[in-house]
Amino acid sequence: MHLKRVITMVRKAVLSDVEQIHKLIKNASKKGNVLPRSVLSICENIRDFFVFEVKGRVIGTCALHVVWKELAEIRSLVVLPRYRRRGIGGELVKEAIKEAKSIGIKKIFVLTNNERFFKKFNFKRVKRDSLPHKIWIDCINCPKFPVCDEVPLLLKI
């Protein structure tokens, strides 16, 4: 399927997207690509999420989570495997960066195993201890804790 021939859209998530978002994140978390998120967590944070939709089906998602004054995290970036390498993840990240600028965020960080992808958006590697301790709260629930193989990257906007 060629995405340019079907109706596609990046948009803010709504509550009716929760089950599809949850399924995407759940499947990706089994492979260790993202942290799992409960349905409750997605509902509580629905305003953080963007979705990429094709013909009414959510095939990609990501969240922009405000962590601290002027600091946010891009997280839960997932695209269905058969739709990868088509620019969908990039469109989701661009939308998150756009929203971050609109609400006054000055820095966005990401913890990732795909450093090359985020470097396309000018994210730079930083030392873990340069980020506030508050961001490591989610790490306690990670199966990789305390031996994390993710790289912290930061974008100044």
Image (cartoon, grey):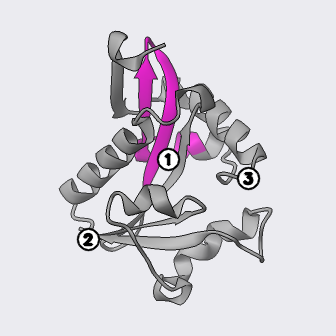
Vertical position of residue 66 compared to residue 87: above or below: below
Image quadrant where residue 125 sits: bottom left
On the picture, is 114 further left or further right than 37?
left
- Please give the name of the residue rendered at 57% of the width and 72% of the height, measured from the top-left corner: 151
- Amino acid carrying label 2: it is Lys
Mark 3 = which residue? 32
- Amino acid carrying label 1: it is Asn
Vertical position of residue 48 compared to residue 142: above or below: above
Q: Secondary structure at mark 1?
A: loop
Q: Secondary structure at mark 3?
A: loop
- Please give the name of the residue rendered at 53% of the width and 28% of the height, measured from the top-left corner: 83
Image quadrant where residue 137 sits: bottom right
Which mark's residue is nearer the viewer, 3 or 2? 3
- Please give the name of the residue rendered at 73% of the width and 53% of the height, measured from the top-left corner: 32
Q: Quadrant of the C terminus?
A: bottom left
Mark 1 = which residue? 45
Q: Which residues are magenta?
A: 42-64
At label 3, counting other C-alpha atoms closer than 10 Å, the crowd grade (few under 14, some 14-19, many 20 or more) is some
